[in-house]
Structure formats: structure tokens, C-alpha cells
Amino acid sequence: MITEKLFDNKPYLREFSANVLSCVPAGKRWTVVLDRTAFYPEGGGQPCDLGMLGGAQVVDVQESDGIILHTVTAPLEGRVDGCIDWDRRFDLMQQHSGEHIVSGIVHRLYGWENVGFHMGSDVITIDFSGPLDWDDLAKVERMANETVWADRETLVRRYESEAACPEDYRSKKAISGPLRLVEFPGADVCACCGTHVARAGEIGVIKLLSVVRFHQGVRVELVCGRRAYEYLAAVTAQNRAVSGLLSAKPFETAKAVERTAKELETVRYERGTWENRWLAARAAACRGAGDLLLFEDELSPDSLRKLCAEILEVCGGRCAVFSGSDRDGYAYAIGQAGGDLRAFVKEMNAALNGRGGGKPGFAQGRVGAARTAIEEYFTK
């Protein structure tokens, strides 16, 4: 009992009729076997088709020993009509076909093998067996899209066995039994059981997104077809927004960002200089003051720490600095030269709804109490 694979010869078939050969419960679902199906089962890096079968949702499709198993949401019997989710199928056809073209070009140019392939819901990843950089990818991407623009017919050939095949082709593993080759002329010939577009032009566009080192080679991310269009549309919208914010032309946003970054670096340097002067002056005013409780407006955690440390060196006692508001709570830094504040900080956090800690002589954290409650705690 082997299921007839309608998708193998008719990848554009969206609707079909078939006889239910078996239907058995599988938890809260049912596993259905048909005499024929247009639903592609998960395999070869390509996710399975989804859709409707006899009024039930198809939520998974797998293959076992030539039998295709449909997981559905309701029991089925007799003759049923099936309808695949075409938008999903065509998207997967675009992605899979684009992956073949890119892998074939990389193999032809650099000799690297495709040793891993995953077709996710957002991007495709391909693992290659050797190094590639952005200059390499730019060349590959250009050639891949030239293949798309040439719009040649996708060719499928079958052989009784690997030994009977006279052609050179890509394959990640040795194949036993019948061999199915998919060719994108000028780019790739590969053993594959998946579904592909009829002509390369249907892929639309291929966009390579990233490359990172992975094991002994690299992992490349890419998108094709509608996914590539949506990605480029989103990037264009982002660039248009940046262009408006920086008052720069769309192709000059990088220079505008670089200029703004340099200006920001200068401002940060100047701010740091003035902050250091303010810290020194604030600390000098506290020289010899003994134990201190201070409240400062809008200090960053780093500035709060610096101020407390500066004052601690000259005040001659314990220094506690708080910054915040009654609405949002207060960050704190507390120090005592040569002291051990751990028990004090623990008790303070418990009393003022706080959390934090640090070294014996210096601690940082945050409390959720009002200023009056903090002042009362320190004066008790």
C-alpha cells in the first residue's frame, strides 16, 4: 500500500479527490492514509503542506515506507476532497528553488558542499562546508538573480538508480532506489524529492541576508520570492524613516548616521567632562561631613556609583545617595570605608521594599519606598 504522490509530477495541483484507506485515532487527532495525495510530506529540508481534507484540517504530513500519513482534526472515511494551502506551498516552492540555485552556484564557484539546510517560517539557512565572506556572497547573489531573470524552465529527470545516472549532480547522501534530479539550467543539478517552481522567474528575487562562521564553514541566511519582497519593503520603510529623521537622502543615510554618531561621541565626552567636574565639586562640599544621606535627580546607575564613591573618600563616614522619585522608586548607592554594610543593607531592603547588594563596604540597589520613608529609616 504505497500512496500515489500527485505532487511529484503536478506540483501546481491545489485540489484533488482520493479514497480513505485507513483512519486511526492519534491522541486528539486522527492519522489518515489515502490512495493518492497532493499533500507534500515533510522531508528533504522542506516543511509539509497544510490545508483541508474532507472538511478536516490537515496539521501534519509525514511519510513512512512510501505511505503518506496525514494528521487531521476529525475522522474521515470514503472518498474525500483535499485542498492544500496554496500560498504556503508556493512560498515553500520559491524558497526551496532559491536554495537550490544558491547552493549550486556556491558549489560551482568555490567547491563547497551544502551540508545542512533548514527552511524556517521566516528565513532559510544553508550550512556550507567552507568559508565565504560578504564579497563572495555579493557575487553569488548577483549570479543567483541572473538565473532568476533568465527564467529558464526547471527540468526534472528520473533514473532507476544512482548507478544508472550518467550525470554529475549534488547530493548530501548516497541514494538507494530511484533517483530524481532537479535542474535549474546554468546554476544547479541536485537530487531532490521536493516541490519547485516551473520556471526560475517565478522565484522573483533572491536576497542573501547574513553569513556567520559555523563549524568548519559558514551558515548563510536568505529569503526568496514574497519573503524577499516583504523584507526589502520593510528595510526600505525603515530607511525612509531614518532618512526623514536625519534629513538625509535615502542613499546617504549611512553617512548621516556616521556623522551623527561622531557628534554624539563628542557630546558624550563633553558631558563626561562636566560630570566629572560636578562630581568633584559635590564631593568637596561634603568633606568631613560624616554620615550623609543625599537625594539627587536623574542619575544613571554609573553616575550614582561614582558620586557615592567620590563623597565616601572625603566625608569620613557612611554615605548613602538615592536618585529617583516616589512614583518610580529610588536607586541607591551606599558606602562606608572599612565597614561592613551587608547586614544594614539587608535590613534596609526589607524595610523599604528594596533589593540589591554588593561588597562589604559598598552596595547598590533599588527601593520602592517614598522619600519620607527613606529619610525616616536613616534617622531612626
Image: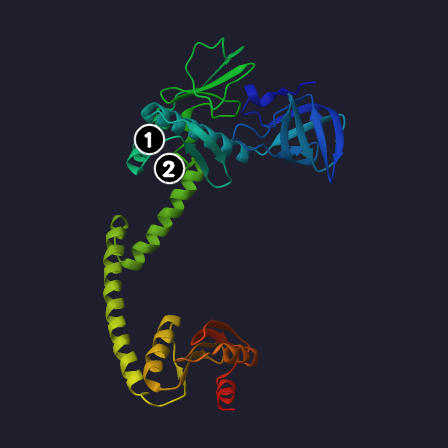
Whichever of labels 1 and 2 marks the residue nearer the N terminus, that label is 1
Residue 52's quadrant in the figure?
A: top right
Q: Secondary structure at mark 2?
A: strand
Left or right: 246, with 18 as reference point:
left
Say if residue 372 shows up in the picture: yes
Front-most of residues 6 and 102: 102
In contact (CB < 8 Å): disc 1 and disc 2:
yes
Say if residue 75 shows up in the picture: no
Q: Amino acid at mark 2?
A: Leu
Residue annotated with mark 1:
140
Front-most of residues 284 and 163: 284
- Could you tell me how far apart the alpha carbons at marks 1 and 2 are, in whole angstroms? 9 Å
For the point 37% across and 23% down, which residue is it? 187
Left or right: 79, with 233 as reference point:
right
For the point 41% across and 15% down, which residue is it? 168
Q: Is residue 118 above or below residue 327?
A: above
Left or right: 56, with 290 as reference point:
right
- Looking at the picture, how far across and down is residue 117, in whole percent? 47, 32
- Looking at the picture, how far across and down is residue 49, in whole percent? 58, 32
- Looking at the picture, how far across and down is residue 225, in whole percent? 43, 35
Residue 66's quadrant in the figure?
A: top right
Q: Is residue 259 above or below residue 37?
A: below
Left or right: 101, with 262 as reference point:
right
**Numbered tag placed on residue 208 in the rendering:** 2
Residue 207's quadrant in the figure?
A: top left
